[in-house]
Image (cartoon, rainbow, N blue to C red):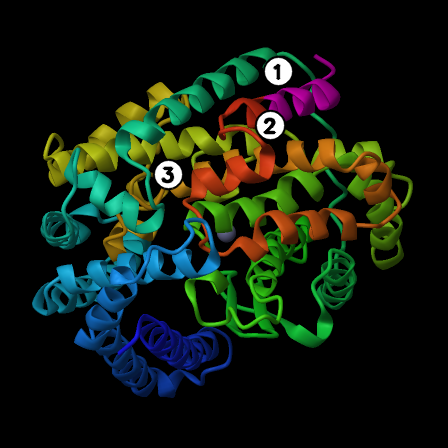
Amino acid sequence: MTARQAYESLVAHSRESADLGAALSLLSWDQQVMLPPAAHPGRAAQIGALTAILHRRATDPRLGEWLAACEADAPREPGTPEAANIREWRRDFDLAVKIPEDLAVALARAASAGQRAWEFARKENDFKAFAPHLQELLELSRRKAEAIGYAGEAYDALLDTYEPGETAASVAPILAELRDASKALLEAVKDAPAPKPLPAGPYPVAAQQALLADITSLLGLPPDASRLDVSAHPFSTLIGPGDARITVRYDAADFTKALFGAVHETGHALYSLGHDSGDGRHGTPMGEFASLGVHESQSRLWENQVARSLPFWEHVLPLAVARFPALSGLSPEELFAAVSAIRPGLIRVDADETTYNPHIVLRFELELALVRGDLAVADLPGAWNEKSREILGLAAPRDAEGCLQDVHWSMGAFGYFPTYSLGNVYAACLFEAARAALPGLDAAMAAGSFRPLLDWLRANIHEKGRLSRPRDLIAAATGESPTAGPLIRHLQAKAKAVYGL
Ligand code: ZN
């Protein structure tokens, strides 16, 4: 077999797996959005069957032979899409075969049982009921890290599966810088008058739906290639080419919850739709997202840098007033200030832009200690509150609002949290670079034109797929290695505008 034939075999295999993966995504979307309650056990079996088929395909020994044939061929120009595909197929294949089947099955079972136990434990505020599951997931995750291998420490192997190239040592200084900047900003605004909250409504759900349809298509989400539905936990999923689906949750007392949720998920959807520019990269690594951090940078950029900006509200406020008379009389400045208020709280998913990253620091330090074996599972609630007081200045009165608030650890997702802060950091780096590259961007947004920004993101991030590792991808787009600087400048500028510092 020639290297060319091997490469074509890899493309065909990869694409078929992607199409089977699309069927899996559709089953899962349907489960969360449409499925009648009695159909859940059957659906779990269907999802399990497809997942097993996909796992078998990912570890197919022929992949190893095809890859070896490609790699033995004259080295391809590094940095070309073909070279990137081969490198990323190798990464995926090695990762899949390194984890023994019995461990993969044990992890999947423990994650499913862990999630059910966590739901119960959170509802009943009963950490002890969840602790044995957390213990098991931790032990299995350590085994997974050993199976994958690492240069520094076990945590690095887990983090690398979400964010290629990152380690505990590489993310720690960024997180510490964000924690300190957030603390300084909180201190600076503590005596300043808080922005006026928005009127209490009413914000009828039908009117919210209509406004979201306007806004998502204004931002560039094509109505003929997307859907907007309702689910208990908002999410975004790409079913396949030309089929990006997002969900939201409506609150009739606060239209901004669904609005920022929809804009966030629209950011994810625009990224997913942007991989495929119709040149056959669908189903290959070049047609996939680079990392969780890069995915989150796209949702956060549209949510925070765009939809929590004054130019955005200059254009959108009249659209909102037309749907909600309660907002009439408000200025764009007042709306911008209300959605940019700094309000420290216990719950990560409700956190504002400034206090969000310290929530990640808290989780990162605790999960690192758990994986290292420096913190016993039984001691987690106490350690959580101690660190929470130190980092956020708050302690949770109940574990349900403390160490039991997030689903991630119950699924064995250790090393996932830092990708949220990396997403925030990358979003700010990209937006600063886009603003420099697109003079008049603010004026364009105030006039309702978001196309120049989307086109810039398409060319610099979306169409690059997995061409390079996340940090290199951001560096190539912005012209410099990513740092926390742009995000800190963004937060400082907002505090200045909103609190008049
Ligand atoms: Zn997201």
Residue at position x 41%, y 45% from top? 469
Across and down, in percent, residue 274 comes to 60, 61
Residue 354 appearing in the image: yes
Q: Is residue 433 left or right of residue 379?
A: right
Q: Identify the disc placed on residue 402.
A: none
Above-or-below relation of 104 to 150: below
Counting other residues with Cα less than 10 Å from the Cα at mark 2, is it few (<14), some (14-19), or many (20 or more)? many
Q: Identify the disc placed on residue 342.
A: 2
Quarter of the image with the C terminus in it: top right
Above-or-below relation of 458 to 424: below
Above-or-below relation of 308 to 220: above
Q: Which residues are magenta?
A: 489-501
Q: Is residue 347 left or right of residue 73?
A: right
Mark 1 lies on residue: 189
The answer to which of 158 and 256 lies nearer the viewer is 158
Q: Amino acid at mark 3?
A: Pro
Dominant secondary structure (helix, strand or loop) of the stretch shown in magenta: helix
Mark 3 lies on residue: 418
